[in-house]
Amino acid sequence: MKILLKIVLLPITLALNILLGISKFVLVFGGGILGVLSFVLFALGIGTIIVAGFSQAIPAFIAGYLISPWGLPMMGAWIIAKVEYFNDWLKGI
């Protein structure tokens, strides 16, 4: 019975492995690009503080934080980890 279940779940685990590989690739390179953009927004915020004051720079700092490695890429890594955990659980059945 257990072997039959593994045969039935094989296409699902194969699809999840391919999806995880593509997702990790996109996360690494997208995170690098977003890290550079985050630095640009931070520099823009510092320039805005010098020119227009702190209250005008808050949106640049918020946007910079959201695309920094602690913002959206970290959320993506968390989702990938949960899918990977589920895939490992399916393989263990």
Image: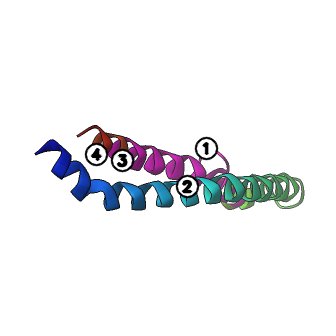
84 to the left or right of 12 = right
Question: Is 71 in front, or is 32?
Answer: 32
Q: Which residues are magenta?
A: 60-86
Q: Tell me whether the residue at label 4 lies in contact with that at label 3, contact meaning CB atoms closer than 8 angstroms.
A: yes
What amino acid is labelled 3 in the image?
Asn
The residue lying furthest to the left in this view is: 1
The answer to whether the residues at label 4 and label 1 have Cβ atoms under 8 Å apart is: no
Crowdedness near tag 4: few (<14), some (14–19) or many (≥20) residues, C-alpha within 10 Å: some
Mark 2, other Cα within 10 Å: few <14 / some 14–19 / many ≥20: few
Which residue is label 3 attached to? 87
What residue is shown with label 1?
Answer: 70
Give the crowd class for mark 1: few <14, some 14-19, many >=20 residues within 10 Å. few
Q: Residue at x 37, y 41 (%)?
A: 85
For label 1, the SS is loop
Residue drawn 73% across the image and 61% down it: 56
> Under tag 4, what secondary structure?
helix
> Which label sits on residue 90?
4
Which badge, 4 or 2, comes first in the chain's sequence? 2
Q: Which residue is mark 2?
A: 21
The kind of residue on which mark 2 rests is Gly
Give the position of the C terminus as an image quadrant. top left
